[in-house]
């Protein structure tokens, strides 16, 4: 008899299946009976904190020549304590969930980025009143690719560093 026929003998195959099932059953019994009861007092529970990383997208080169920029305009200094173009603001009052920065002013427009609680932005456009909110165009203080329209309810003026 050849070696392959001896190995593939129906009794050998049946025996291997039975041993395999016994090993799986023993492992399942061990796992079921050795885990601590998660509701028992004194058993520590894990807490998971999700911290989202900022996303930044690189501009796609179009191959078109650069357009000339407009001449710089000196903006008047805003009154202290008021939101205005050129003011530095930070996101606050979101309960840690952050502020959606949108394509256009309004709750129905697409979300560009999530501005994080305490993240600092510069106001570059606005105000626009839509959906009962006053919207300002915000550009990231350290990353100008993070930009979008944000509602003033969640903005607080900060001093320039």
Image (spheres, rainbow, N blue to C red):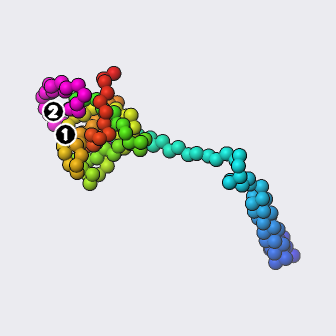
Q: In which quarter of the image is residue 161?
A: top left
Indicate whether 29 appears above or below 65. Answer: below
Q: What segment carries the magenta color? A: 58-85
Residue 57 magenta-drawn? no
Is residue 69 on the magenta stretch?
yes
Residue at the extreme top of the image, as rendered? 161
Q: Is residue 59 among the parts visible in the rendering?
A: no
Q: Is mark 2 on a helix, strand or loop?
A: loop
**Alpha carbon separation for disc pair 1 and 2:** 23 Å
Dividing the picture into quadrants, the one containing residue 11 is bottom right
Q: For residue 127, which numbered disc appears in the image?
A: 1
Q: Mark 2 points at which residue?
A: 69
46 relative position to 9: left or right: left
Horizontal relation, residue 100 to residue 15: left or right: left
Percent x, y for residue 7?
A: 82, 71
**Observer-nearest residue: 75 or 145?**
75
The image position of residue 80, as x and y in percent, is 23, 25
User: Which residue does the image show at 27% across and 32% down from the upper left?
Assistant: 122
Name of the residue lying farthest toward the bottom: 10
The tag earlier along the polypeptide, 1 or 2, is: 2
């Amino acid at each position: 008899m050849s070696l392959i026929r001896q190995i593939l003998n129906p009794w050998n195959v049946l025996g291997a299946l039975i041993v395999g099932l016994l090993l799986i059953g023993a492992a399942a019994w061990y796992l079921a009976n050795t885990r601590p009861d998660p509701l028992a007092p004194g058993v520590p529970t894990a807490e998971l904190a999700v911290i989202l990383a900022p996303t930044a997208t690189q501009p796609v080169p179009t191959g078109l020549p650069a357009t000339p920029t407009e001449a710089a305009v000196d903006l008047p200094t805003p009154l202290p304590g008021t939101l205005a173009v050129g003011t530095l603001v930070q996101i606050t009052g979101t309960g840690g969930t952050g502020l959606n920065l949108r394509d256009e002013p309004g709750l129905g427009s697409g979300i560009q980025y999530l501005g994080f609680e305490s993240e600092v932005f510069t106001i570059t456009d606005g105000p626009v009143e839509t959906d009962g909110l006053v919207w300002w165009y915000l550009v990231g203080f350290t990353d100008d690719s993070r930009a979008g329209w944000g509602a003033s309810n969640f903005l607080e003026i900060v001093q320039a560093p």
